[in-house]
Image (tube, helix red, strand yellow):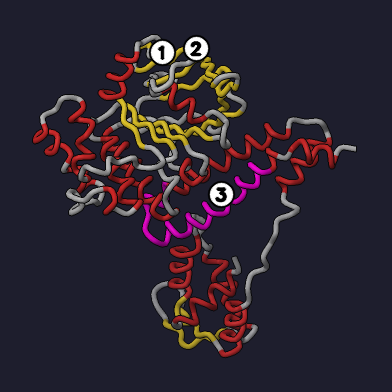
Amino acid sequence: MSVPLTLLGLLEREPSHGYDLKRDYDTYFGRGRPLPFGQVYATLGRLARDGKVVISEVQPGVGPERKRYVITEAGATEFDAWLTDPIEAESHLQSVLFTKVVLALMLGRPAHEYLDLQRGAHLERMRQLTEIRRAGGLVDGLLADHGLFHLEADLRWIDTTVARLDALRAEVVK
Amino acid sequence: MADIMIEARDVVRSFGQTPALRGATVAVAPGEILAIMGPSGSGKSTLLHCLAGILVPDSGEIHFDGRRVDTMGETGRSALRRDSFGFVFQFGQLVPELTAEENVALPLLLGGTRRDAALREARPWFGRLGLDGLEGRRSGELSGGQAQRVALARGLVTSPKVLFADEPTGSLDSLTGEQVMDQLVGAAREHGTTVVLVTHEARVAAYADRHVMVRDGKVAALTPERVLS
């Protein structure tokens, strides 16, 4: 998750104060990992230095000054380029799990037991996400779905790999 | 596990020369939702059928609520299935000649409840499962998801202690399947029903409290027991 680009996207919607940006970031993208205020203002400072945002007004108050940030044309162009550029379709061919399976087979260790442990960990996480989906609203539900589909894909890979362990062993054990 | 609602102990079951279960052991706590997973032909449905008293093991024991099931005769097991168990299968298996309402009332009618009383008990399930207005339809006039929810209502109408669900969403698209599972789990939680769920789909299994896998006719734990609230 790119914090600068996400903040630019929120500013593309409307000029905002740092506090509002943090609140919206935490609501939609934080997912239990709120953005520290320090990081919000440091990021906005860098974006201002690079000419991607400007400060439109400063409101004095009891606490710290409240600065209102506005996205510039350079910022909007960068955000638009990011938004329309597809994410690299990562094949995960060199995943940690794959490495573990191959090394387990090479070392004569019980690869299927490791895969069962992983299957259990995946199912437990899927159970948690399913509870979130059942209890939460649409935003939580769709985010949980994203996780569920990825975990499900991993589990299908685990099923396929378990079914082919003997063949894989023959290939990797010299 | 402190309390046990239903349990298989070292169950062996073969079909002809082909062994399906080779010493399967599993226990389910009251109110627990257990998912039995495994690849096709692993024996997971055979295990469900043994637990439910549909099949008798060649050896080993089945216990339900403190009673030994595998030594009962067919009459005793049949009464147990009718009075204490509910069933939902992959295909709803509704009786096509009956209305949805009569299908839901069927287990009560088979148990000797009078027709008007059985229908009166069946009716609230239509509201609970989002089926209002479909009471008079026959199975051919229902969508796959509606038919499966009618089958779910039929499985729950007797307030069974255990609901056995064998691939309950297998014939549905994923979104409809999730709606059926939401309602199955919601109803089971509300009534404290123990659920034995057989599925090969991880997304369906994810609704369960705990997961086991049947492999080579034996049961392996995948996730640990949870303290049920």
Residue beneath the point at 39% across and 35% down: B165
Residue holding disc 1: B70
Image x and y of residue B77, in percent: 33, 17
- Amino acid type of disc 1? Asp
Q: Are marks 1 and 3 in contact (CB under 8 Å)?
A: no
Question: Is residue A95 left or right of A17 when viewed as pictured?
Answer: right
Q: Is residue B211 magenta?
A: no
Image quadrant assignment for residue B68: top left
- Name the secondary structure under disc 2: strand
Mark 1 and mark 2: span between their CA atoms?
A: 8 Å
For the residue pair A52 and A139, the one nearer the viewer reads as A139
Magenta residues (range): A131-160
- Between residues B37 and A63, which one lies in front from this camera angle? B37
- Describe residue B166's horizontal placement relative to residue B223 as left or right: left
Image location (x, y in percent) of residue A139: 42, 62
- 10 Å crowding of disc 2: few (<14), some (14-19), many (20+): some
Magenta-drawn stretch, dominant element (helix, strand or loop): helix
The residue that mark 2 highlights is B60
Foreground tag (1 vs 3) = 1
Q: Quadrant of the C terminus of chain A?
A: top right
Q: Which residue is mark 3?
A: A152
